[in-house]
Image (spheres, helix red, strand yellow):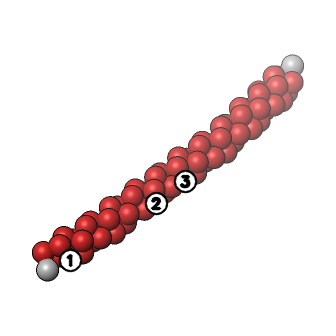
Amino acid sequence: AKAAEAIRLRADVFKFESAKQSLRSEVGGFKRSKRCFREREKNELDVKVTDLSASVKVKEHEVVDLDA
């Protein structure tokens, strides 16, 4: 009876360890997805900043041309 109980408890421990590892993997996946999303968002903002900077330069040249 004790041996059977020990075997059952070991099986339970194995199931819990497996579930824990699975959850760790899932959390790691979420963290990677979040990092990728932030990186993509940062890149999109960088492009917008570059576009706005170019627009400012064009407007500055237009103002200079009007003053001339």
Measuring from the top left, give residue 7's x and y in whole percent: 24, 71
On residue 17, the disc is none
On residue 33, the disc is 3
The label nearer to you, 2 versus 1, is 1
**Disc count in the image?**
3
Residue 3 in sight here: yes
Measuring from the top left, give residue 44's x and y in whole percent: 67, 45
The label nearer to you, 3 versus 2, is 2
Q: Residues within 10 Å of mark 2 (few under 14, many from 20)?
A: few
Q: CA distance from mark 3 to mark 1?
A: 44 Å
Instruction: Tell me, yes or no, whether the two marked residues, 3 and 1, touch with CB atoms within 8 Å.
Output: no
The mark nearer the N terminus, 3 or 2, is: 2
Residue 34 in sight here: no
Report the residue marked by disc 2: 26
Residue 43 position (above or below residue 34):
above
Report the residue marked by disc 1: 4
In which quadrant will I find the N terminus? bottom left
Describe residue 40's horizontal placement relative to residue 20 as left or right.
Answer: right
Q: Nearer the viewer, residue 26 or 34?
A: 26
Q: Nearer the viewer, residue 54 or 67?
A: 54
Residue at horizontal 87 percent and vertical 19 percent from the top: 68
Q: Residues within 10 Å of mark 3 (few under 14, many from 20)?
A: few
